[in-house]
Amino acid sequence: MRDTRGRSRGLVAAAAVVVALGWLEAARPWGLSLPRLTGGLVHLDLLIRAGIFTIVLVGLNLLMGYAGQVSLGQAAFYGMGAFFSAILTVRAPVLGIPPTVASTWWWPWLLMAVGTVLVGGFAYAIGLVILRLRGHYLAMATLGLGIVVYIVLRENLGLPHLNLTGGFDGVFGIPRLRVGPWMVWPAARYYFLVWAVALGAVALGLNLIDSRVGRALRAIHGAEGAAECLGIAAHRYKAQVFALSAGLASLAGSLYAHFQAAVVPATFGFVPSLELVVMSAVGGMTSIWGAPAGAMAVLLMSEVLRTRIRHVIPGVAGEIEAVVFGLLLVGVLLFWPSGLVGRRAGNATALPPAGRRAAEGAAP
């Protein structure tokens, strides 16, 4: 009961912060906009991207932090969702979709939902195969999956005559979302949409980790063999959480596509996958609240370097920025190995080591 109350208070507090930040941006005519109050470090674009990454990181934390399954290809699912929405809205005439359907306000929302289910189903099928691997082998398999998806997107899905993905240039002109006659734009409106979805993902993750599924995932993480001996279908649980994390990544990718109005394959390659893992580690893999904390901390760190270092040391600012950014990340991981939120909440050490205690009541 106490945990439930704590989660509810946390979500209410987070929602209050989101509303407060949105109000500050809406108060731009009175000189209370975010860039003005924070010296240009925090602005609406950064907060929207943090919300989008939070959705991805909730799934990644469930997969890596709670189930103990390494994934270096999460950006692939992120990109699949983004290109699914982009192609079926911008290239609808090429695919024979009637304009009367493609131009309706509900079409992008339908694609968003269908893409989430399809990508999650695809990940479940793939997960049944590759999640038999463990440790470094699983990491390499997910890395390979990410590379394959990136090449397929870059090469127009193997159908260059249709130019569906746009090759290196990607897809442009993705329409903004609408609800009936109302546009979910300017950015302030989109900010509230993204963070409503992000907080929904956080609530989903918080409830999942205390459920029978969550206890099974912790038992699998602690000792997979022992968990199986206790009757936990480890392989099925791992495939399910892999599918859930992929579905959340796809949903975030769709939101990203309609936010940027353009998608390019390079955004969803190997390096973005590593950045997602870094965000997860910085925030705390073993905490759902580590998702928004990691996304915000890394994006803010990057923004500080971008706006400060380049003014101080022009010419080689890009290289200096990368070095300083890397050192800061190493420092965070060295002194806060459980992540910013993980250490504070003590969640990293809360995971049972052997799985027996966590597995009690977790068997299907």
Image (cartoon, rainbow, N blue to C red):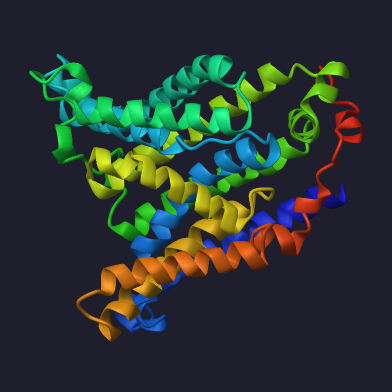
Q: Residue at x 31, y 76 (%)?
A: 307
Instruction: Please tell me which residue is depicted at 42% across the width and 49% down the height of the picture.
Output: 193
Q: Nearer the viewer, residue 65 or 84?
A: 65
Please state, as top left, top right, bottom left or bottom right, where the C terminus lies in the image.
top right
Give x and y (percent) for residue 18: 51, 62
Q: Tell whether 274 sits left or right of 312.
A: right
Residue drawn at (14%, 22%) of the image:
99
In the rendered image, residue 260, in percent from the top left (x then y), is placed at 26, 49
Residue 229, quarter of picture: top right
Residue at horizontal 69 percent and vertical 44 percent from the top: 206
Q: Is residue 26 visible?
A: no
Residue 237: quarter of image: top right
The image position of residue 204, as x and y in percent, is 63, 39
Q: Is residue 160 above or below residue 319?
A: above
Q: Residue furthest front?
A: 136
**Percent x, y for residue 301?**
45, 69
- Which residue is nearer to you in this view: 131 or 172? 131
47 relative to 348, above or below: below
Instruction: Say which of 7 and 101 sits in front.
Output: 7
Residue 130 seen in this snapshot: yes
Image position of 79 with respect to 162: above or below: below
The answer to whether residue 48 is above or below residue 122 is: below
